[in-house]
Image (cartoon, rainbow, N blue to C red):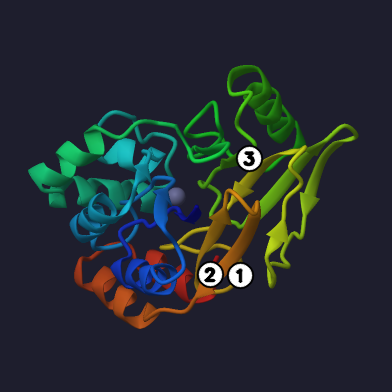
Amino acid sequence: MRYAVISDIHANLEALLAVLGDAQPQAEAFVCLGDIVGYNANPNECVRFVQDLCDVTIAGNHDQAAIGSRRDDDFNSHARTAIAWTRQQLTPASLAYLRCLPTTATFGRGGMAAHGSPRDTDEYLVHRRSIQQSFAYLQDTFPDVRCCFVGHTHVPMIWQCTPQGVVSLLQGVFSHPVLLDRSRRYLINPGSVGQPRHGDPAASYLLFDDEALTVAFRFVPYDVAMTQEKIYDALLPVALAERLEVGR
Ligand code: ZN
């Protein structure tokens, strides 16, 4: 089965629609790694698209903060402002949907969806130590999972667990599909649809084939100016609009 794995949409409708346009002809199923809302100005529209389209969806830390099941003290001030605004916007239907999301889910042959790390929605997998701990946790708790997909950092990445330690594959170079090794375990980040931080404004996601065991990163341009306009109209922090055009 060919899955489109999307993450960190953050209420950016233009980016989500561009990604869906690119992915729908290529994917048989959709997996969403959470943070559907926060930062941008179309939370309800994005919740509705995810609800209608995605076969597997989990909650991110911004979704949890928006429905009040997680405190937002550790958010920076722009993120907190956006969460307060989002809370006022969410319809009862959106709230009901977000409240039902699990924090992790397994899918297909050896696939798993998580937001920050397999053991913690709010853990940033940046340092080698936390990545090693995540692989150890997977091995102990989900021995059948070969590919655990995570979001949260908004930066596309593949880590492979080898007997010699953790190896980062193709950091920053994602121009062709990657063939995975069946005997290894992976942590894979598709990057962010709605607030990319890989140094390019294009929305990012990936295609995962759980039979051929390939991962292909996709970078999709969208109408950034339109998303920025909506941020200004909603009186959300201007910095949230500015960062979209540099992808940082
Ligand atoms: Zn996020």
Within 10 Å of disc 2 (Cα), the crowding (few <14, some 14-19, many 20+) is some
The residue under label 1 is which amino acid type? Gly
Q: Is mark 1 within 8 Å of ligand 1?
A: no
Please tell me whether residue 247 is drawn above or below residue 213 in the rendered image: below
> Residue tagged by mark 2?
247
Dot 1 lies on which element?
A: loop
Numbered mark located on residue 155 in the image? none
Numbered mark located on residue 199 in the image? 1
Numbered disc in front, either 2 or 3: 3
The answer for how far apart the CA atoms under marks 3 and 1 are is: 18 Å
Q: Are marks 2 and 3 in contact (CB under 8 Å)?
A: no
| Residue 58 percent coordinates (x, y) | 38, 39
> Residue tagged by mark 3?
125
Asked if residue 223 shows in the view, the reply is: yes
Residue 43, by quadrant, is bottom left
Q: Nearer the viewer, residue 110 or 104?
A: 110
Quadrant (top left/top right/bottom left/bottom right) for the C terminus = bottom right
The residue under label 3 is which amino acid type? Leu
Residue at position x 43%, y 74% in the image: 22
The residue under label 2 is which amino acid type? Gly
Residue at position x 33%, y 51% in the image: 54
Please tell me whether residue 150 is drawn above or below residue 43 in the rendered image: above
The answer for how far apart the CA atoms under marks 2 and 3 are is: 19 Å
Asked if residue 67 shows in the view, the reply is: no
Please tell me whether residue 67 is drawn above or below residue 172 in the rendered image: above
Within 10 Å of disc 3 (Cα), the crowding (few <14, some 14-19, many 20+) is many
Is 58 situated left or right of 117 in this image?
Answer: left
Q: Nearer the viewer, residue 142 or 61?
A: 142
Q: Are marks 1 and 2 in contact (CB under 8 Å)?
A: yes
Q: Nearer the viewer, residue 72 or 187?
A: 187
Q: Is tag 2's residue or tag 3's residue first in the polypeptide sequence?
A: 3
